Image (cartoon, rainbow, N blue to C red):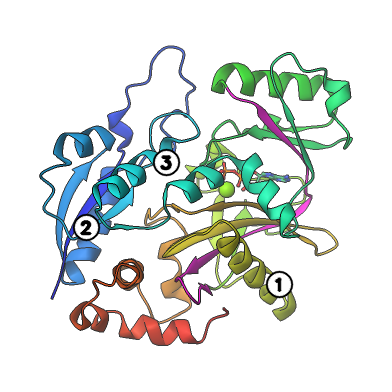
Amino acid sequence: MGKIIGITYDLKSDWQRGGDDPVDINAEFDKPETIERVATALERGGHRVARIGNVHSLLAQEDNLDVDIVFNMCEGISGRNRESQVPVILEMKGIPFVGADALTLGIALDKVMAKKLFMAERIPTPRFFEINKGDDLEKVNGIGFPLMVKTRHEGSSKGISRQSRVEDAGGLKRQAGMINDTYGQPALVEEFIRGEEFTVAVLGNEDPRAMPVVQVSINGHVELGDEFYTHDRIASESLQYVCPAKISGELTSALQDLAVRVYKCVGCRDFGRVDFRVDDLGHPYVLEINPLPSLDVKDVFNIFPNVFSSNYDEIVNKVVDFALRRYNIIDEGSLAASVCLTESLKGLKS
Ligand SMILES: Nc1ncnc2c1ncn2[C@@H]1O[C@H](COP(=O)(O)OP(=O)(O)O)[C@@H](O)[C@H]1O
Ligand SMILES: [Mg+2]
């Protein structure tokens, strides 16, 4: 028996860019095609879909929602709690939802908070400091150069351009000032990790499993050196995903083990994705965890069919099954749809 699944989401078109807004203000929001693709996957899994929309639509309907569970894809509009808003409303209303809860989403969005947790669990992450408006840059920089200057609580490479890698005090001042002024938040400054880049998805709850390792290639090269993932590159053909990554079994295991540790460390649920850089000596560093990873068909969750016998539809339905089981509202019918993926997952690392 299928369920009625509500979908909450922010569409790029929900946000009209104001004159002072950064150009990438709506970068994290979804395209209508992505929502429709997820809806189709759920319908193919035997469920009925109700499109709820963003947090305002949710608030308008909160007492009349006729759904068994919500598939939450909302990134929220602004502030470091923005991703937590929909989950907290659903939690208050006692409506089950797929994916991480408000606390995990808040921690993961605020990269400084997440890094402090990683450090507490001895999970390797680049050394860092923060720059607030008016800080004395010489006093805060205990690392040296080159550095990577990012936003403290944005995703989707917002605020990241080729200028984000800085080699001197002038560059640091310029980029940190840009983050402080344009994004209205502290700049997160990290040691720049020269080398290669990977991302590892994780699925499940009691016994989370790492999916095959995906490697980032830029302009046809996986040895990125000083290159990195910028906002402009997301939309271009220069950025490609290679899966499975052509790396040693040892590095594959190390990345998958770390991905599962990070997932557990911040209390992810159902699914997530961990981003890594690996330096020229082969040491992995965790950049961040995405408890609300993109389900765009050009993104990582649509790449696994290349390497294992499960397609996008099965993965989306499997994620829902994990959530239904968590709330104890699973029924055997919907489980059958993902038996094939369950078998594949057994072979993956936990
Ligand atoms: N310390 C770093 N060293 C080298 N490259 C980095 C570093 N931090 C981020 N990057 C590059 O910037 C990209 C985006 O950074 P990330 O921390 O994953 O934020 P986002 O939430 O925008 O994805 C990464 O995928 C990577 O290419
Ligand atoms: Mg990232």
Whether 212 is drawn above or below 58: the answer is below
Q: Nearer the viewer, residue 221 or 228?
A: 228
Q: Is mark 3 within 8 Å of ligand 1?
A: no
Which one is earlier in the sequence, the residue at label 1 or at label 2? Answer: 2
Marks 1 and 2 close (CB-CB < 8 Å) = no
Q: Nearer the viewer, residue 175 or 346?
A: 346
Residue at image mark 2: 39
Residue at image mark 1: 254
Region in magenta: 185-210
Element carrying mark 1 = helix
Image check: 97 left or right of 343?
Answer: left
Rate crowding at label 3 as few (under 14), some (14 to 19) or many (20 or more) other CA atoms within 10 Å.
many
Q: Depth-wise, is mark 1 or mark 3 nearer the camera?
A: 3
- Image-quadrant location for residue 2: bottom left
| Amino acid residing under circle 2 | Ala
Q: Distance from label 2 to label 3 (Cα)?
A: 21 Å
Image check: 44 left or right of 237?
Answer: left
Q: Position of residue 146 (x, y in %)?
A: 83, 37
Q: Distance from label 1 to label 3 (Cα)?
A: 29 Å
